Image (spheres, rainbow, N blue to C red):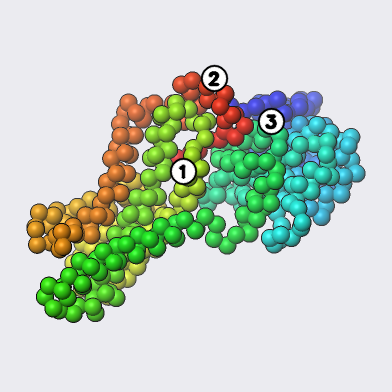
């Protein structure tokens, strides 16, 4: 899957790697971390520096040369220097960087710091080269730790499709996913992304707010309003604690289900398309990008359920639900959803047949809470059946049912691998 055409061979014996050579301008923290990760992936790495003899702490196996010499070793160059230090690129741009693919990884200290993005500025400085904005959303620490902090996505943009595809291939080789944001005009948006305080939280917060409001008024109508109308009793004092403690676990369970639903849907789409290189719909793309936030909100609501459980005397199995969630969510994923759904079934298995519980013909709230989790679990069960699992595993390993069609629909320009 990796395109080797951008790597120029080095002539020193033992230096050429099977994946080719990558050039990096800059020997700072990010440049060194990126170089180390590239070496571990099987690339050869050449650093370009103003003072090659003074460069230290470089990864073992890398080589450091002057900018001009280093640029001759690779078609693709990572520019890991600050915007303020781009002047050397202008001075040597026409001769040294003509026809090269430059990957700008820089960030700014604040939003709208300059009239134009760093990548667009670099493109004007070196018009003979093709600029791609990428890897600025991945930290040096994430590269060193292998992406264990869940920061595994590379946002990229550029005007040259070949250059972008080379960056996508490198990202995949490093175990990262890539998302093409379009032309170089999107560079400003990508550069602003690391400066956002709570990125990708708008949709999860809106969903959590909507679900909380719906289930709150639903439970309010069935318990408080129904009791006041039929029995003339005022139990509004239960709203702040007892009623809230019914809403929190219901919303938490649904948020957890919504965290895993897009991955299941993506699996079925890949089966339908017969390839992993076909773009997902934009709405599904955005949904998948905020799965972590959905899970964190579900965890926060579960903790609120624990706190409310400690305040009021509720039977011990409610406490068991929250404990099961917090212990297993970090590692067991769908098993967590299954255990929480199973607990809800056990909680009300003998209640759904009681007509007295259908107040105003409305089913108990826990029954509504089971709809989305059950859908997710059924779909996931279909995906893990041996015949389906074998097919989707082959697709995610690169097999395509009709390669000519998938590459002919314009997907080659922005294709990407999504690890579900």
Give whichever of 306, 165 is nearer the camera. 165
Residue for point 48% across, 45% down: 283
Q: CA distance from mark 3 to mark 2?
A: 18 Å
Q: Secondary structure at mark 3?
A: helix
Say which quadrant the C terminus sits in.
top left
Give whichever of 166, 174 is nearer the camera. 166
On screen, residue 90 versus residue 59, left or right, reads right
Give whichever of 235, 377 is nearer the camera. 235
Q: CA distance from mark 3 to mark 1?
A: 26 Å
Q: Is residue 188 above or below residue 25?
A: below
From the image, tell me which residue sits under label 1: 284
Q: Nearer the viewer, mark 3 or mark 2?
A: 2
On screen, residue 105 versus residue 267, left or right, reads right
Is residue 105 visible to the viewer in this orientation of the structure?
yes
Residue 344: x, y in percent?
22, 55
Say which quadrant the N terminus sits in.
top right
Question: Of callouts 3 and 2, which one flags the residue occurring earlier in the amino acid sequence?
Answer: 3
From the image, tell me which residue sits under label 3: 162
């Amino acid at each position: 899957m990796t395109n080797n055409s951008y790597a120029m061979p080095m002539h020193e014996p033992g230096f050429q790697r099977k994946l080719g050579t990558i050039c990096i301008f800059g020997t700072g923290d990010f440049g060194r971390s990126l170089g180390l990760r590239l070496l571990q992936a099987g690339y050869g790495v050449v650093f370009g520096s103003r003072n090659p003899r003074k460069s230290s702490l470089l990864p073992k196996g890398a080589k450091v040369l002057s900018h001009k010499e280093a640029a001759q070793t690779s078609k693709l160059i990572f520019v890991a220097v600050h915007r303020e230090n781009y002047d050397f690129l202008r001075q040597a741009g026409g001769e040294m960087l003509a026809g090269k693919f430059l990957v700008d990884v820089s960030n700014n200290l604040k939003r709208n710091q300059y009239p134009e993005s760093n990548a667009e500025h670099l493109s004007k400085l070196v018009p003979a080269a093709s600029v791609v904005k990428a890897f600025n959303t991945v930290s040096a620490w994430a590269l060193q730790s292998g992406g264990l902090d869940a920061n595994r996505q590379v946002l990229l943009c550029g005007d040259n499709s070949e250059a972008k595809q080379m960056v996508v291939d490198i990202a995949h080789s490093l175990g990262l996913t890539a998302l093409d944001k379009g032309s170089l005009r999107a560079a400003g948006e990508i550069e602003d992304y690391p400066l956002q305080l709570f990125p990708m939280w708008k949709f999860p917060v809106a969903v959590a707010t909507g679900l909380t409001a719906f289930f709150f008024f639903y439970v309010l109508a069935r318990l408080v309003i129904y009791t006041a109308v039929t029995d003339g009793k005022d139990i509004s004092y239960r709203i702040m604690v007892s009623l809230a403690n019914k809403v929190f676990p219901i919303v938490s369970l649904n948020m957890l289900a919504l965290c895993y639903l897009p991955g299941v849907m993506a699996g079925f789409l890949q089966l339908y398309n017969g390839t992993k290189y076909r773009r997902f719909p934009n709405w599904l793309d955005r949904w998948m990008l905020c799965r972590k936030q959905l899970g964190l909100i579900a965890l926060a609501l579960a903790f609120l359920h624990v706190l409310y459980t400690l305040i009021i005397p509720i039977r011990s199995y409610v406490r068991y639900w929250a404990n099961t969630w917090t212990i297993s969510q970090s590692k067991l994923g769908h098993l967590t959803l299954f255990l929480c759904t199973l607990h809800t079934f056990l909680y009300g298995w003998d209640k759904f047949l009681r007509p007295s519980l259908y107040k105003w013909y409305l089913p108990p709230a826990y029954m509504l809470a089971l709809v989305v989790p059950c859908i997710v679990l059924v779909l996931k069960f279909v995906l893990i059946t041996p015949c389906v699992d074998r097919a989707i595993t082959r697709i995610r390993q690169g097999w395509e049912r009709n390669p000519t069609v998938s590459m002919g629909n314009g997907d080659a320009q922005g294709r990407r691998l999504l690890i579900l």
